[in-house]
Image (cartoon, rainbow, N blue to C red):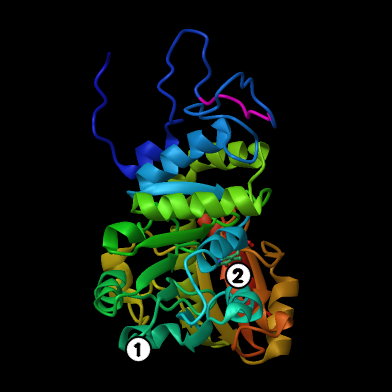
Amino acid sequence: MTSTPPVSAATLALHPGSDDRRPGSPFLAGPVFASAYHLPGDPAGVKYQYGRFDNPTWSALEDIIGKLESGHALTFPSGMAATAAVLTPFVSPGDTIVLPEDGYFATRAYAQTFVARFGVTVRLVPTSQMQDADFAGVRLVFVETPSNPRLDVVDIEALAAKVHAAGALLVVDNTTATVLSQAPLRHGADITVASDTKAFNGHSDVVFGHVAVRSDEHLALVRQWRTLSGSIPGPMEAWLVHRGLATLDLRLARQSDNALAVARLLAGHRSVSMVRYPGLPEDPSFEIAQRQMRYSGAVIGFELVDGDAAQRFLATCGMLFEATSFGGVHSTAERRTRWGSDGVSDAFIRFSAGCEATDDLVGAVGRALDGL
Ligand SMILES: Cc1ncc(COP(=O)(O)O)c(C=O)c1O
C-alpha cells in the first residue's frame, strides 16, 4: 500500500476520492442510477439497500466534502433542501430561532411560512448586528457569511463562542464563500449548509446542496430527515458536482482576482455611489474576511445613481449575463429589487465575477460605466 502525503484542501478537492487504482479503473467512477440493489436475506449491514436510503455516487461526493469541511457531509437536491434539512429537524414547538434579516430571502420565507407554523418563534437580526445580539433562550442561530447580497462578513469563531454560551447551535450558510475559502466547522460552527448550485458546482447547470455537521448525533438526525422526507439528490447531479469540484480552487482564484479588479474600478468611478466587496481594504468586512477567508470571492454589491442607470448598465455591458444566480464561470449581474425582497435600493446591482480574462471583463465594465 502506498502512503498518502498530507495535502491542502485545494489538492484534496481535485482528487476523485476513490482509492481504486487497479489498472483499467477510472479516476472518478460514473454515476450509479440504481433505485434497487441486490439485497437477499437480512439487509442489516448492507450499505446500499434502496435508492432513497443511500447511493454510491452520493457517498463518493459526501466523503470528499466531509473531509474538506472537517466533518460529515450529506448531499441534497438544492441549497434550500439543505437549509430545510436543518431548520426542520433541529427545532421543536416553543423554540426560538434567529435568522438574518438581510440574507437569502427564501431561508426567511421557509422559516416564517412553515417552521413558524409548528410553534417556533422566528427572530430576525441584521447580519451586521448578529455579533451584538442577545441569544438567551434561543435554540438555533443561522447566519450567512458573507451575506447575500449585502456582503457583511461575520466573525464565525467569536459568534460561535457567544451562541454556545447561550446553549444554542450555530448554523452557517457557506454558499457565497464555499468550503475552499472558509470551513465554518473549523471556526466553531456546529452545522454548515451550502447551495452548491453556486460557485461550488460553478457551471450553471446543476441545482444542488449539502449539509455538513461535526457530531455523529447530528449526522444521524439529518440523514433520518433526508430518508423520511425523500429530499434526495439525483445521481447525475451528484456526479456533475463532484466533477466540478476538481476546478473549484482554480475558479475561486480567477473569480476573486476578477472581482477585486472590478471592485477597484467601481470604487474609483464617478457613476458609482457605493461598493461592497470583502476584498477591498476600505470595506467594513475586509479585516475579518482577511482572517477568515482564503478568497474574497466572486460577488460584489454596488449602487449606481438610480434604477434606470442600473438597468442601462446591465443592458449595455456585453460581457454580463443578466441572471439571478452567482458564483458561476460566466459573469452575471442583476438588480435585486426586481424580486422586491432584499432590503436594497433600486440602484443596487449584485455582480458575480466569472472566469473571463481579467482585462476583457474590466474593459467591458468600464465601457458600460463610462457610457452611462
Ligand atoms: C446564500 C444562499 N443560500 C441558499 C440558497 C438556496 O440555494 P438553491 O437555489 O440551490 O436552493 C441561495 C440561492 O440563491 C443562496 O444565495
Q: Closest to the observer: 352 or 214? A: 214
Query: Earlier along the polypeptide chain: callout 1 or callout 2?
Result: 1
For the N terminus, which image quadrant? Answer: top left
Label 2: state its secondary structure.
Answer: helix
Disc 1 marks which residue?
A: 133
User: Image quarter for residue 32?
Assistant: top right
Residue 330 belongs to magenta span: no
Q: Looking at the picture, which amino acid does disc 1 mark?
A: Ala
Between circles 1 and 2, the one closer to the viewer is: 1
Q: Mark 1 Cα within 10 Å, few/some/many (few <14, many 20+)?
A: some
Report the image quarter containing ligand 1. bottom right
Disc 2 marks which residue?
A: 365
Disc 1, disc 2: CB below 8 Å?
no
Q: Give percent across and percent down for residue 211.
A: 48, 55
Q: What residue sits 51% from the left and 72% below the top? A: 300
Q: Marks 1 and 2, Cα distance to the nearest angstrom?
A: 39 Å
Using the image, tell me which numbered label, if any, was put on residue 88. none
Image: 117 above or below 190: below
For the C terminus, which image quadrant? Answer: bottom right
- The residue most toward the top is 23
Q: Closest to the observer: 220 or 4? A: 220
Query: In this view of the protein, can residue 76 be seen by the observer?
Result: no
Query: In this view of the protein, can residue 352 be seen by the observer?
Result: yes
Label 1: state its secondary structure.
Answer: loop
User: Image quarter for residue 333?
Assistant: bottom right
Q: Closest to the observer: 120 or 7? A: 120
Decide if residue 45 is on the left or right side of residue 137: right
Q: What residue sits 67% from the left and 61% below the top? A: 319
Q: Give percent across and percent down for residue 168.
A: 34, 74
Image: 5 above or below 234: above
Query: What stretch of residues is rendered in magenta?
Result: 28-34
